[in-house]
Amino acid sequence: MSEKTRYTDAELEEFKEIILGKLEKAEKDYLIFKNSITHSDGNDTQDTSPTFKVLEEGAATLSKEEAGKLAQRQLKFIQYLQAALVRIENKTYGVCRETGKLISKERLRAVPHATLSIDAKKGQKS
């Protein structure tokens, strides 16, 4: 029997459900980070007493920077997940872009936006 070159439609549907779940959570997390930067959630230092305000402004700046980095990282993750959905629609999902072989189901369940097999990923680090 020849080696599989792509996942079946049923398998792709399973991965699509995993990705959609992760995408929904990632988008919620992104909004939380974005809101913490813009203070649109109302939890900022505007209503604290002047005594604590000086101390909190420094912390707010740091947390804004951290939230900005986290928001950027989350947005990138969302883009990776969306690209994975496109690969599912094109029926190219789960194929290693280096070896052309199928990426293991275990890897795809853990990292659903993966485009490299474990062997190809290890080879990149050399």
Image: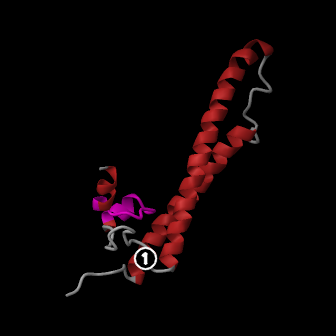
Residue at image x 48%, y 71%?
16
Residue at image x 48%, y 69%?
17
Please name the residue that numbered disc 1 is placed on: 12
Q: Where is residue 121 in the image (x, y as percent from the top left)?
A: 33, 57
| Residue 42 in view (yes/no) | yes
Query: On the picture, is 77 further left or further right than 39?
Result: left
Secondary-structure class at tag 1: helix
Task: List the single residue furthest toward the top.
Answer: 51
In the rendered view, tell whether residue 23 sits above or below residue 69. below
The three-letter code of the residue at mark 1 reads: Leu
Q: Where is residue 28 in the image (x, y as percent from the top left)?
A: 61, 53
- How was this image coloured? secondary structure
Query: On the picture, is 109 further left or further right than 55?
Result: left
In the rendered view, tell whether residue 24 sits above or below residue 125. below
Q: Position of residue 60 (x, y in %)?
A: 68, 27
> Any magenta on residue 44?
no
Residues 50 and 79: in front is 79
Quarter location, residue 119: bottom left
> Any magenta on residue 117?
yes
Task: List the single residue furthest toward the bottom.
Answer: 1
Quarter location, residue 124: bottom left
Q: Give the range drawn in magenta.
A: 106-119
